[in-house]
Image (spheres, rainbow, N blue to C red):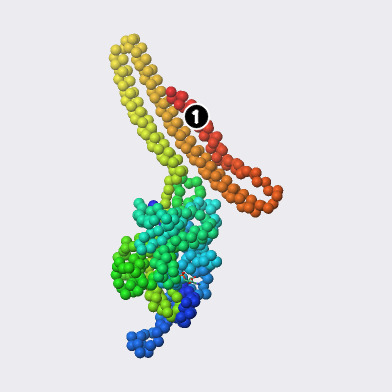
Amino acid sequence: MKDTGESKEQQFTVALRLRPLSDAELDESATIVAHRVDQQMVVLMDPLEDPDDVLRANRSREKTYMFDVAFDYSASQEEVFRGTTKGLIEGLISGYNATVFAYGPTGCGKTYTMLGTDKEPGIYVRTLNDLFRAIEETSDDMMYSVSMSYLEIYNEMIRDLLNPSSGFLDLREDSKGEIQVAGITEVSTINAQEVMELLVRGNRQRTQEPTAANQTSSRSHALLQVCVKQQSRSPELQQEVRFARLFMIDLAGSERAAQTQNRGQRLKEGAHINRSLLALGNCINALSDKNGHKYVNYRDSKLTRLLKDSLGGNSRTVMIAHISPASSAFEESRNTLAYADRAKSIRTRVKKNLLSVTYHMSQYTSIITELRAEVQRLQKKISEQDRRHSSERADIRHVQAEVQAHSSQEVERLREQLLQGFKEQMEIRRNLMELENSNNELQVETSRHLLIIADWEQERSRRRRKWRLEQQKESEGKEESEDWDSSESAPEASETREASTARENLLLLMSEQKNLHKQKE
Ligand code: ADP
Ligand code: MG
């Protein structure tokens, strides 16, 4: 990969979302202790009112937190999407990596924000919808390929949520140092409805915790990865390919990890501690260190290995922290707010991922390069030839001198013959050399024309595809109409003048080449 994109410093964006009180919370007559004050501020009130508690007596009962954006129960899915993720899409198709993750205790709305429901789809589908729309809008000039994978990390084991029967998958580092999941299913689709079905089906495959408060996936992380590759349709020989990865992550419940984290305990193997989440917390702690000198250990867990670029490196990253507003959730909410507050000071450096490829077009480039080398070789040969030629002339002078010395008639006749022989030999050599040079020029010309034809053919197949799509759309529209003639076939797009001239020239060049071969013989 060529690192030609400029890099920019980018802050970790941290959003906070407060969900509505749940029925269960209402049943236990919980009160609301967390409020959104304005677009950025959230206040949390300590529900404990115990005047005898000496420790708390002198403490302020409320604490405010500032975030990049704050949402409460009244915020719609669309508003949350617009306020957190929408802005990443333009970057994504220009080659900037991005990551969005949902953080918070179990039952606080992470899955609701990311996956959502059929009626109220979340960030996954809204993002893909927008991405496909952005691609459609620029697809006349750009070619895209989008692929998607969906996986779960549970107890440090990776499962493919689109193909759960494939067992546990491993992480591999590729030659560019990027972490990949070996053998993961990658789907290419640009239909948002299909995507939603895939994801809902995938989500049902997430590992369930029987003891969990809301019965679903409190210890599993779900990662949706979207890869976008883009390149221009212009027929340049050297093509710039941009590609970027978007991670959208529904993290495991933070309840146990956050407590461990806030007590400053080191990461350790424990029955109820989620290694990936703890490692994530440790990385965030180290990354947000004001002096910036802390060592960041990404290798501690699968999640942090996968997110290495997103956290400390090349990604625009958004964290959406979730809390319940209920008094009964006070401790967890305080832990979550403190954690999210720390994440605010992380800065990442982003740069465009550019890749200079030599595509099928490049075959021609290499042909031309080879031909150039060949021409150079021949030129060298010609100049050597010239040098030899002059030394041969020296030989002739020598012969002439001898001949003059003897000056007999017989010798004079021999001299004539010899000179004639030399001349003829020289002439033939020179002709051969010229023939070879024009052969090389012909080949360069031929390559150039082939190139034009190849371009045209690519353009034609693109047009045909577009025409077929339009026909399909039209035929769906015309289904009921009777005079619809389905036998119509694709219009044979007439060749551009450039392409047909290239074709004609190619034929001429080929016959010229034949002639040359004959002459050489
Ligand atoms: P988590 O994934 O964090 O464990 P869920 O997303 O499963 O939590 O949310 C728990 C419950 O609360 C679900 O029934 C969900 O539909 C509901 N819920 C969460 N956030 C909201 C919200 N903003 N508006 C309405 N219902 C919500
Ligand atoms: Mg969930």
| Residue 371 visible in the snapshot | yes
In the picture, the quarter occupied by the C terminus is top left
Q: For the point 64% across and 51% down, which residue is it?
A: 475
The residue drawn where x is 46% and y is 45% is: 237
Q: Is residue 2 visible?
A: no
| Residue found at x 65% / y 54% | 477
**SS class, disc 1:** helix
Residue in the foreground of this view, choosing between 324 and 440: 324
Q: Does the residue labelled 1 lie within 8 Å of ligand 2?
A: no
Q: Whole-percent x and y of residue 270?
A: 31, 68
Determine whether, in the image, residue 22 is placed left or right of residue 411: right
Q: In this view, does 275 lie above or below 434?
A: below
Where residue 98 appears, as percent x and y from the top left, is 43, 61
- Image location (x, y in percent) of residue 168: 38, 57
* Mark 1: amino acid: Glu
Left or right: 141, with 437 as reference point: right
Q: In which quarter of the image is residue 4?
A: bottom left
Report the residue that reaches farthest toward the right: 483
Image point 38% across, 88% down: which residue?
A: 50
Can you give x and y, in whole percent of width and height, for residue 326 in the image?
45, 79
Q: Nearer the viewer, residue 201 or 264?
A: 201
Determine whether, in the image, residue 357 is placed left or right of residue 404.
right
Q: Which residue position holds label 1?
A: 512
Examine the rendered structure and indicate whether residue 148 appears above or below residue 116: above
